[in-house]
Image: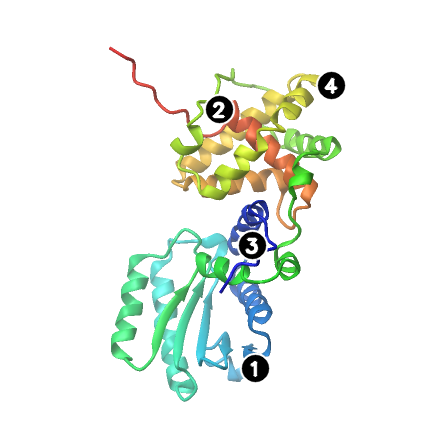
Amino acid sequence: MQLDPGISAQQRYWWRIALELRLRQSNSGAFQDFFSLVMGHLHGDDFIRVRPFGKLGDQGCDGYLHSTGQLFQCYGALNGETKQVAKLINKMNDDFATAAAKLGAIMREWHMVHNLVDGIPVQAVASLKALEKENAKIKFGFIGYEGFVERVFSLGVERIESLLGPTASEDDSKSIDIATLRKLVNDLATVADGPQLETLDLRPVPVNKLAYNNLPNHWKMLIAGGWMNAPFVETYFERHPDPLTGDKVATLFRAKYEYYKAQNLTPGEIMSALYELVTGVGSVLPQQQVAAQALLAYLFENCDIFERETVMPTL
């Protein structure tokens, strides 16, 4: 599968974020529907969308690729929940057993499609290998986040946009919309907790902070790209009628960052959650993307979110 040359690097970064959020937000039937949409765009009528019919059920099949005999079973966990390992293993074994009994004549491959963006438990890998050993004539596999990336980004721009929404262009990024920034900031200010504010430590950000925090590459590029608009955010806060608005927003984000960090979320998960805090759930327009990018870059630059590298004193 080859990447559409009409897709820019910046579009890929935005769409990777949109795809990650879409997968985390989709569970159960919604996740199966999204997978079917992607496969339908990619394979046309060769992909057969499947749904249960009354008591007949779906016979262990959530989609079928006719030309290859690939049978797909979807596991869409709520918000990418990774703790229910036993539930995942049981579903894999039960669904394959059903498909083997009912659809063995047409099944040449069996793939578990999941939305566990940050990876699957090793127990699931062991279970899949056990099924593979017991059923040597069938090819097995997982399709997760990277599998979705591969499939989605082999589509044309219009089809990706129909799945994930529009993205900000380089021209959009060069012209931040202050009205959009104002709305995002005002919405955040209403969420900010209480009037008691901690004193903020706004030391300059080290140049290697992006690398130190081990952010995924798409977030590194988007935060770095947002720095050119960060001064507009600073100016907006300085001129805001409520002089404490900037402090309120910074305190809110620092508290949220510490909360997510305490949940042992990865840096990428934390940044995605903070981005969603700014934009809300759902499709994000290009002008909102640019304003959110600038706001997160400003907070990152001022060390309100994520960590400074510890500098050892010289002896």
**In 3D space, how far apart are the residues under numbered discs 2 and 1 (Cα atoms)?**
55 Å
Q: Is residue 139 left or right of residue 236?
A: left
Residue 268 image position (x, y, % from top left): 45, 42
Residue receiving disc 1: 54
| Amino acid tagged 3 | Arg
**Residue 134 relative to residue 58: left or right:** left
User: Residue 303 got which mark?
Assistant: 2
The residue shown at (30%, 18%) is 312
Crowd band around label 1 with a 10 angstrom C-alpha radius: few (<14), some (14–19), many (20+)? few
Q: Which residue is mark 3?
A: 22
Which quadrant: the C terminus?
top left
Are there few (<14), some (14-19), or many (20+) residues within 10 Å of tag 4?
A: few
Q: CA distance from mark 2 to mark 4?
A: 24 Å
Rounded to the nearest angstrom, the CA distance separating label 2 from label 3 is 28 Å
Q: Indicate the secondary structure of the residue bearing disc 2.
A: loop
User: Which residue lies most toward the bottom here?
Assistant: 105
Question: Mark 2 or mark 3, which has the lower sequence index?
Answer: 3
What's under tag 2, amino acid-wise? Answer: Cys
- Looking at the rendered image, the disc whose residue lies closer to the viewer, 4 or 3, is 3
Q: Seen from this angle, which residue lies furthest front?
A: 5
Q: Which numbered mark, 4 or 1, is in the foreground of this view?
A: 4
Please report whichever mark, 4 or 1, sits nearer to the chain's N-terminal start. Answer: 1
Q: Amino acid at mark 4?
A: Pro
Looking at the picture, the colour scheme in use is rainbow
Q: Which residue is mark 4?
A: 241
Query: SS class of the residue under badge 1?
Result: helix
